[in-house]
Image (spheres, rainbow, N blue to C red):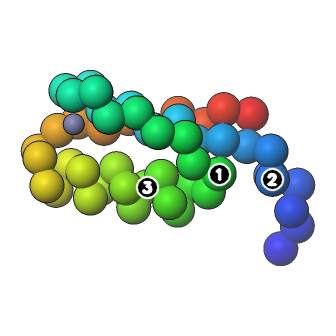
Amino acid sequence: MESSSRTERYHLVCRECSLERLYHAANDADARSRDHAADTGHRVVVDRIT
Ligand SMILES: [Zn+2]
């Protein structure tokens, strides 16, 4: 795999509490957002920042 996406960031924000994090990997952000949604029932959004 190419490493051309190294500088991308994934901004995870929960719409229903103060959770907000930055991730370098989509997989990490996705896993965390699913975790949080499963734990709390909150709606979590992940925006890719290029
Ligand atoms: Zn939340």
Amino acid marked by disc 3: Asp
Residue drawn where x is 29% and y is 56% of the image: 34
Which label belongs to residue 6? 2
Q: Is residue 7 left or right of residue 30?
A: right
Amino acid marked by disc 2: Arg
**Residue 41 vertical position relative to residue 1 in the rendered view, above or below:** above
**Residue 3 vertical position relative to residue 1 in the rendered view, above or below:** above
CB-based contact (under 8 Å), mark 1 and mark 2: yes
Q: Residues within 10 Å of mark 3 (few under 14, many from 20)?
A: some
Q: Quadrant of the C terminus?
A: top right
> Is disc 2's CB within 8 Å of ligand 1?
no
Q: Quadrant of ligand 1?
A: top left
Mark 3 lies on residue: 30
Earlier residue among tags 2 and 3: 2
Earlier residue among tags 1 and 3: 1
Q: Quadrant of the N terminus?
A: bottom right
Mark 1 lies on residue: 24
Q: Point out residue 2 in the picture as x, y percentages from the top left corner.
A: 88, 67
Q: Point out residue 41 in the picture as x, y percentages from the top left corner.
A: 11, 45
Element type where label 1 sits in the image: loop
